[in-house]
Image (tube, rainbow, N blue to C red):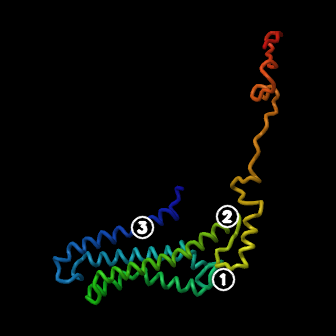
């Protein structure tokens, strides 16, 4: 698209993790040369890279993926103008995503202080990361749905809020309406093939009758 925002900026978010991996590898490799991990310069470079990467990713989660902290949010403080779920869910997700994005700091402290073994901490952080992504998916899907409807990328505005049995009839009725998505051909709006109105071309392409009825006029003489 030749647009730096948001695609290149989003690529920068993933690229920031490269520095985290590189410095973590160098820290692990050079730890044997230092009596304390905090004497290792790569430890501090890894911490700085991790902070930058976590701040980058968290800002992108909240602002871009979820569309929160919208200036036109109105009464939905720190959220956005249109929301599907209760406001409490959004505030919980904002705090939860912040805590789990920086969970590496707690993990680093607990393992370095020998409070928790690295294997147990890896298992705990893995489970919590799955939970973070689970919550992230809900609000990412909701924001994309609202953008599709608001920018007319979707014709039918079907709510993604939890439904009950009373809503099924209305949804089925909407699906059965003859006028569907306008940018796709259906049986009702598929263009019909144009008929050839030229009688000469029609007689050659779609001859009627037998070959005996087909004559060609050459120099005023009719031949079969």
Callout 1: helix, strand or loop? loop
Count of residue discs: 3
Q: Is residue 81 visible?
A: no
In the rendered view of the protein, which quadrant contains the N terminus?
Answer: bottom right
- Asked which secondary structure carries label 3, the reply is helix
Q: Position of residue 27 (x, y in %)?
A: 25, 74
Where's residue 156, x and y in %? 71, 66
Q: Secondary structure at mark 2?
A: loop
The structure residue drawn at horizontal position 77% and vertical position 39%, both measured from the top left corner, is 194
Nearer to us in this view, 128 or 214: 214
Give the CA distance from mark 2 to mark 3: 29 Å
Q: Are marks 3 and 1 in contact (CB under 8 Å)?
A: no
Residues at marks 3 and 1, CA–CA distance in whole angstroms: 32 Å
The quarter holding residue 40 reads bottom left
Circle 2: is it few (<14), some (14-19), or many (20+) Cα within 10 Å? some
Q: Which residue is mark 2?
A: 154
Q: Please state the horizontal and vertical placement of residue 95, each as a whole percent of the image.
A: 49, 85
Kindly report which numbered mark, 1 or 2, lies closer to the viewer in this rendering: 2
Q: Residue at x 77, y 63 (%)?
A: 177
First in sequence, mark 3 or 1: give its number. Answer: 3
Q: Earlier in the sequence, mark 2 or mark 3?
A: 3
Give the CA separation, mark 1 to mark 2.
25 Å
Tell me which corner region of the image, top left, top right, bottom left or bottom right, holds residue 186: bottom right
Is residue 145 visible in the rendered structure shown here?
Answer: yes
Q: Is residue 73 left or right of residue 108?
A: right
Tag 1 residue:
74
Q: Is residue 160 left or right of residue 16?
A: right
* Residue labelled with disc 3: 14
Q: Residue at x 77, y 53 (%)?
A: 188
């Amino acid at each position: 698209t030749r647009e730096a925002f948001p695609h290149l900026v989003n690529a920068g978010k993933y690229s920031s993790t490269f520095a985290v991996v590189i410095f973590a590898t160098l820290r692990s490799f050079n730890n044997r040369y230092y009596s304390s991990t905090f004497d290792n310069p790569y430890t501090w470079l890894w911490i700085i890279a991790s902070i930058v990467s976590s701040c980058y990713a968290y800002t992108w989660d909240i602002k871009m993926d979820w569309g929160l902290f919208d200036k036109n949010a109105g009464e939905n403080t720190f959220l956005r103008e249109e929301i599907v779920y209760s406001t409490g869910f959004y505030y919980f997700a904002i705090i939860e995503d912040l805590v789990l994005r920086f969970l590496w700091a707690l993990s680093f402290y607990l393992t370095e202080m020998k409070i928790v073994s690295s294997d147990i901490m890896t298992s705990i952080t893995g489970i919590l990361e799955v939970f973070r992504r689970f919550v992230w998916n809900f609000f990412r899907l909701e924001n994309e749905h609202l953008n599709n409807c608001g920018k007319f990328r979707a014709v039918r505005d079907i709510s993604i809020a939890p439904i009950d049995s009373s809503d099924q009839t209305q949804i089925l009725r909407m699906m059965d309406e003859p006028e569907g998505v306008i940018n796709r051909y259906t049986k009702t709006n598929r263009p019909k093939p144009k008929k050839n109105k030229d009688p000469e071309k029609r007689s050659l392409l779609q001859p009627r009758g037998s070959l005996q009825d087909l004559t060609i006029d050459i120099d005023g003489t009719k031949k079969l």
